[in-house]
Image (cartoon, rainbow, N blue to C red):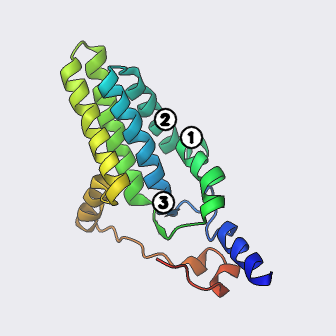
Amino acid sequence: MHDALARSTHITLRTADPYRDLAVIDERAPRFNQVVVGSVSLLAVVTGWWPLLAVLAVQLAVGLRFGRRFCLPCVAYFEFIQPRVGEGRLEDSRPPRFANKVGLVFLSAATIAYVMGFPLPGALLGGIVAALALLAATTGFCAGCWMYKLAAPLFGITIRHIDPAEFCAECASLPPKAP
C-alpha cells in the first residue's frame, strides 16, 4: 500500500511549477504543443482551411506574450496530461520558446500570403510548419531549438543544465526518474 501511494504521489508531484518556473519546461510539453501545431497546420494545408493557420499564429503570439496560462495546448498538457503521466525531464525553456517564435513567423507569413491571394506560398509555409512540428513531435528533433542552441554561443548565451532540486526541496529526496 505504501509503495503504491508513493508511486502515485511521485506521478503527480511537480518539480517545477509550470506557470511560475518559466526558466524550465517539462520536455514533453513542447512535444504536445508540436503535435497540436503540426496536426492543425497539416489539416489547414490539406483542406485549404487557411484561417486555421491564422488561429495557430494568434495562439502562439498570445502564449508567447502572456505566458503559458494563455497557451491552450500548454494548459491542456499541464492540467490534464502531466498530472496523469507525471512530469518529464526538465529542460531550458528558451530553445522551445525560440522555436515557437519561428513557428509564429512562418504561420503569420502563410496567413498573409493566403490573404493577399497567394495560396501556393501560403500552403508551402504552412506545410513547412506542419512538417517541422510533426518531425519534432515524433522524433524529438526540434529545428527551431537546434537553431537556438547553435546560435546561442555566438551571442554569449549559455544553455542551462537543469537541476530539479533547485525548484523543489522535497523533490530532491525522491528517487531519480527513469529516462
Percent across and percent down for residue 48 are: 32, 20
Percent across and percent down for residue 90 are: 50, 69
Q: Secondary structure at mark 3?
A: helix
Farthest right residue in view: 1
Q: Nearer the viewer, mark 2 or mark 3?
A: 3
Q: Which mark is residue 59?
A: 2
- Classify residue 38 as left or right of residue 32: left
Depth check: give the residue in front, 162 or 89.
Answer: 89
Provide the residue designation for mark 3. Answer: 28
Inter-mark Cα distance, 1 to 3: 15 Å
Depth check: give the residue in front, 120 or 179.
Answer: 179
Query: Is residue 174 in sight in this rendering?
Result: yes
At 19% from the left and 25% from the top, the residue drawn is: 121
Mark 2 burial class by Cα count in 10 Å: few <14, some 14-19, many 20+: some
Mark 3 burial class by Cα count in 10 Å: few <14, some 14-19, many 20+: many
Mark 1 burial class by Cα count in 10 Å: few <14, some 14-19, many 20+: some
- Classify residue 53 as left or right of residue 66: left
Q: Amino acid at mark 1?
A: Leu
Provide the residue designation for mark 1. Answer: 72
Inter-mark Cα distance, 2 to 3: 19 Å
Question: Circles 2 and 1: CB distance less than 8 Å?
Answer: yes
